[in-house]
Image (tube, rainbow, N blue to C red):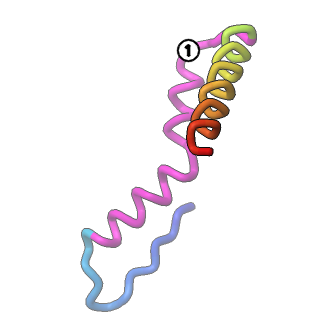
């Protein structure tokens, strides 16, 4: 359960924004979308490898 403490006089939009941020961090939506369609393990591994290569290239460019 996600709890967002709201102080008296706090803006409701700010509280809603905090809630959305916490909800995104939990990864519930991402997991739900992943479960909707089966993905073969070989395809999942390929995506994982491609992401690792991409991140590694980004880190090399930064240096």
The residue lying at 62 percent from left, 45 percent from top is 63
Q: Give the side of residue 22 with respect to residue 47, left or right.
A: left
The residue lying at 74 percent from left, 8 percent from top is 42
* Quadrant (top left, top right, bottom left, bottom right) of the N terminus: bottom right
Crowdedness near tag 1: few (<14), some (14–19) or many (≥20) residues, C-alpha within 10 Å: few
Locate residue 10, reporting x and y percent: 29, 84
Quickly name the residue at label 1. Answer: 37
The residue lying at 48 percent from left, 50 percent from top is 24
Question: Is 63 in the magenta?
Answer: no
- As drawn, 59 above or below 6: above
The residue lying at 26 percent from left, 73 percent from top is 12
Q: Give the side of residue 4 with respect to residue 41, left or right.
A: left
- SS for callout 1: loop
Farthest bottom residue in view: 8
Farthest front residue in view: 63
Count of numbered circles in the view? 1
- As drawn, 17 above or below 60: below
> On the image, which quarter does residue 14 sit in?
bottom left
- As drawn, 14 above or below 45: below
- Residue extent of the magenta highlight: 14-41
């Amino acid at each position: 359960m996600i709890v967002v403490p709201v102080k008296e006089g706090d803006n409701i939009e700010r509280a809603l924004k905090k809630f959305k941020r916490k909800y995104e961090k939990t990864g519930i939506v991402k997991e739900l979308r992943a479960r909707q369609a089966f993905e073969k393990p070989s395809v999942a591994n390929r995506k994982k490898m491609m992401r690792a290569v991409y991140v590694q290239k980004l880190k090399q460019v930064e240096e």
